[in-house]
Image (cartoon, helix red, strand yellow):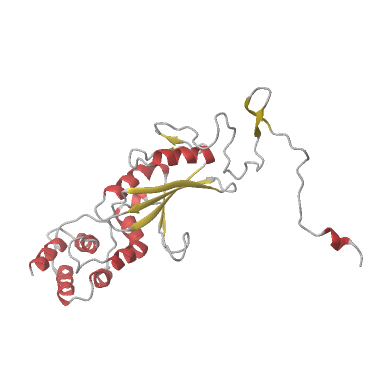
């Protein structure tokens, strides 16, 4: 009963939020899915929804109860209130909704479901802008209900037909809640992306690799230089407009006793192949 009373106090506590109105049924449904069909818990939820708040306005009261409902759904203490299946469901269904409603000014677009991931591993995707990337990453790392402490990878995708041709992709992991999230930033060739090396130390080499392969500049990086290609390499190999043969070739010169880099020379001109059989043109 002591735990129940403490839960009631938390549900009635003033908490800031930015949620929509007229969603009491949504809170009851979320609480029933997250906490289970316990009679005591559901009674406390009903009481919290009907108890007048000390703050002024019905909208403020609704913000308090629903925000606390999300926080309580991620409560780590007590095996009766949280389990691995709930954490997995929250990461796939409610995570993007929680982020959008908590920091809407940092989110440009949110995509949940298998639209941009495999069916077996549904990772939500958050689109943001270069200006909001750093504050969004700090929020995702430090917020109690998120705790994305691990940066798994940074890469990019090239779409030459778009004005903002590059999508810089960040994959982050929350070890505490076992949730994964994908962050995307769309930029063109001349727009710089702020570094997140001060937030996640592992981004240092990831950003160097992205700069080396795609030519995306990361402003504020402590040591932005090539990491995979050789010194003096021209171009960025993973761009779609980069030729498959490259611009230079490397060989060992026996007269100079060292490896030399020279302009590429092809023994024959490049030819287009239609993969059709030459025997089909003969009469039978």
Residue 258 placed where, x, y %?
A: 62, 25
Asked whether, in this view, residue 60 is left or right of residue 256, the answer is left
Q: Quadrant of residue 53?
A: bottom left
Vertical relation: 216 (above or below) 49: above
Instruction: Examine the rendered structure and indicate whether residue 273 appears above or below residue 8.
Output: above
Q: Is residue 57 above or below residue 238?
A: below
For the N terminus, the quadrant is: bottom left
Query: Is residue 188 in sight in this rendering?
Result: yes
- Compared to residue 28, the image places residue 211 above or below, namely above
Looking at the picture, tell me which residue is in the foreground, 170 or 270.
Answer: 270
Which residue is painted at 52% across and 37% down in the image? 228
Q: How far across and how far down the image is residue 146, in percent?
A: 29, 54
| Nearer-the-camera pick, 255 or 191 | 255
| Residue 166 point in image, percent of width and height | 52, 45
Residue beneath the point at 47% across and 46% down: 155
Residue lying furthest right in this view? 283
Instruction: Please give left or right for residue 280 compared with residue 123 in the image.
Output: right
Q: Out of 142 and 190, give the one closest to the viewer.
A: 142
Q: Quadrant of residue 80?
A: bottom left
Toward the left, the furthest residue is 2
Quadrant (top left/top right/bottom left/bottom right) for the C terminus: bottom right
* Percent coordinates x, y for residue 274 in the rendering: 76, 55
What is the number of callouts on the image?
0
For image coordinates 49% across by 46% down, the residue present is 156
Left or right of 76 in this view: 116 = right
């Amino acid at each position: 009963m002591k735990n129940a009373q403490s839960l009631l106090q938390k549900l009635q506590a003033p908490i800031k939020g930015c949620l929509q109105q007229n969603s009491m049924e949504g809170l009851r449904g979320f609480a029933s899915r997250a906490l289970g069909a316990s009679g005591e818990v559901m009674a406390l939820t009903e009481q919290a929804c009907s108890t007048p708040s000390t703050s002024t306005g019905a909208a403020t009261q609704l913000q308090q109860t629903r925000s606390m409902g999300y926080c309580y759904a991620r409560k780590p203490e007590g095996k009766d209130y949280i389990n691995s299946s709930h954490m997995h469901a929250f990461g796939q269904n409610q995570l993007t909704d929680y982020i959008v409603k908590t920091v809407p000014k940092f989110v440009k677009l949110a995509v949940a479901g298998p639209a941009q991931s495999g069916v077996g591993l549904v990772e939500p995707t958050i689109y943001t802008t270069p200006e909001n990337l750093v504050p969004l990453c700090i929020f995702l790392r430090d917020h109690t209900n998120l705790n994305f402490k691990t940066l798994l990878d940074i890469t990019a995708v090239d779409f030459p037909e778009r004005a903002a041709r590059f999508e810089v992709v960040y994959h982050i992991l929350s070890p505490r809640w076992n949730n994964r999230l994908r962050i995307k930033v769309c930029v063109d060739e001349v727009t710089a992306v702020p570094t997140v090396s001060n937030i996640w130390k592992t981004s240092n080499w990831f950003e160097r690799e992205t700069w080396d392969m795609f030519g995306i500049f990361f402003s504020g990086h402590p040591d932005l230089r090539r990491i995979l290609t050789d010194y003096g390499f021209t171009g960025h190999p993973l761009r779609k407009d980069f030729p498959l043969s490259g611009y230079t070739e490397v060989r060992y010169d026996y007269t100079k006793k060292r490896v030399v880099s020279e302009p590429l020379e092809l023994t024959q001109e490049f030819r287009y192949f239609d993969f059709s059989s030459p025997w089909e043109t003969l009469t039978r």
